[in-house]
Amino acid sequence: MIPYLLPSLRLSVVFVLLALAAAACVKVGTLRGGEQEPATTASLPSSKPQVSLCLSSVGGSKGHRVRAVLDAVDLSDGGQWISLLKQPLTITSGQAEAGVLLDRVQVPEGQYQRIRYQISQAIADQDGREITLQPPSQPVEYPLVKPLSLSSGDSVSLFLSWDIAASLSQAPKFAVTFSASAQRIPLTTELAFVSCPEINTVYLIRTDQNRICGSWGIPGRPTSMHADKATNTLYVLAADQSAIVAIELSSGKIRDRIRMPIVARPSFMTIDPEGRNAYLVEQATGMAYRVDLGSGSLAAQVRVGERLDYCEFLNESATLAVASSQGQKVVLLDPTTLRIRQSVAVGNAPQGVAEYGGALYVAENRANTVGLYHLGSGMSLRQQVGQGPSRILVHERTLFVANSLGGSITILRPEQLTVVKVVAIGGSPGEMAVSAARNWLYVADATGNGVTVIDLSSQRRVEGIDLKARPFDIEVIQ
């Protein structure tokens, strides 16, 4: 009908149609710091199975240093070959010994029985002298020890174990000595779980090795998590499905999915120490909710205020703390009724909240400060930290503050907010977790697409774990 309208009206209609088309492709997501992230439908996670290809070594390198160009790694379902690499990669013996994620791709559903490799170049370092080796001219093909079955929504890790010494045993020829195996999750101990909402995946990291040991597919953009070792359960907030997913820690199987239709888009979740209640906040609406995990029912709800940017269950006082950046306050709620117990005026744009010794500690994002608030006396104290503090973690009488805009971790003594050290790690640090057994501090890095590891003994960054995806939350079980 547009050709029959007057020219000015016709132009207006065209603009309206264009605006509607653009709006239909936009989705609003939640970022740390209260910013809104526009994303097109093209960026939404797909339900197709994903395979994370990881490289490791077997038997050690025995002093050999080798690098090779891996042109292709393909899986066969008996009818077609599916590539696991987006482009050729140079791999090294050092990477294999450290254990790295090479690539992650989506593949069709099916059962895969065979794998093949194509190497185009190989070079060995012998006494400081480089020796060019001759790789096979044709792809080398092997059957998988156990077929890999992939279904919609799966996200699994496939490990290539490189026998480095054996690959040089026929020098000057290069032998393709890779063995492929599906993930084998160790017992539910010394593991870190990292949620990556953009790829519908939770990665598992061995804290004794600081390397990926597996991955689980969680549809619905997994965000906040809580691990309960006593009940063998990992609770994951699937934000896009307004659901809490209960996963069996020992197997990765989904045990339950608690849907909450009344909660339009939950932003954050925290769970009480007993694992009885989950608490959710909606950033946009200012609503807070309590979900009874036993019955799966919505037990309480309340409108707290404008722009809710964080929630945390405070174990010492058995209170739910909710940070409102627009209201510049932290609201303390009764854990059963969600009635407001106290409203604490704080610094600009509060986010992370922690409790220690009966006092409240708040990461004041836009003020670049951490605030200390004695709830009984009303006394307060502020300490300048790095740029954009967003999260606070308390461990062994020490505060760790993630400065998301400054790429650093500020370490403080809590009583007087004395700065002990600032650890520059780069990126955009956010959620943190501690492995007490290994004395590691794990920091989710949103811009670095991985996890940074800090040695708490030396208070230095020791390594990074590349996930090739933006992490949201991190949980550790000892």
Image: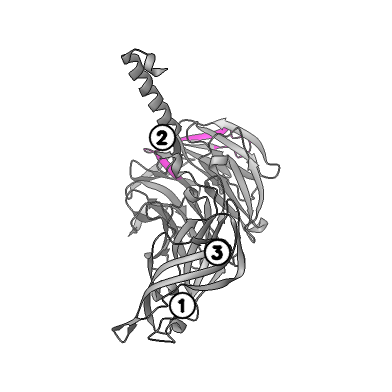
Note whether 56 is above or below 81 in the view shown: below
Q: Nearer the viewer, residue 429 or 10?
A: 10
Q: Which span is picked out in magenta?
A: 333-352
Quadrant including the N terminus? top left
**Label 1 amino acid?**
Val
Farthest top residue? 6
Asked which colour scheme the image uses, the reply is: one colour
Q: How many other residues sit within 10 Å of disc 3, few (<14), some (14-19) or many (≥20)?
A: many
Note whether 57 is above or below 316 in the view shown: below
**Label 3 amino acid?**
Ser
**Label 2 amino acid?**
Gln
Q: Which residue is the site of mark 1? A: 176
Farthest right residue? 295
Q: Which residue sits at x=54%, y=61%? A: 80
Label disc, if present, on residue 364 of the rendered structure: none
Q: Which residue is the site of mark 2? A: 328
Separation (CA) of disc 2 from disc 3: 56 Å
Q: Nearer the viewer, residue 275 or 252?
A: 252
Queried whether the magenta region covers residue 461, the answer comes back as no
SS for tag 1? loop
Location of residue 243 (image quadrant): top right
Q: Earlier in the sequence, mark 1 or mark 3?
A: 3
Q: Which residue sits at x=39%, y=27%? A: 19
Q: How many other residues sit within 10 Å of disc 2, few (<14), some (14-19) or many (≥20)?
A: many
Location of residue 61 (image quadrant): bottom left
Note whether 145 is above or below 78 in the view shown: below
Q: Which residue is the site of mark 3? A: 76
Q: Which residue sits at x=37%, y=47%? A: 389
Inspect this view and state whether residue 98 appears: no
Q: Nearer the viewer, residue 101 or 471?
A: 101
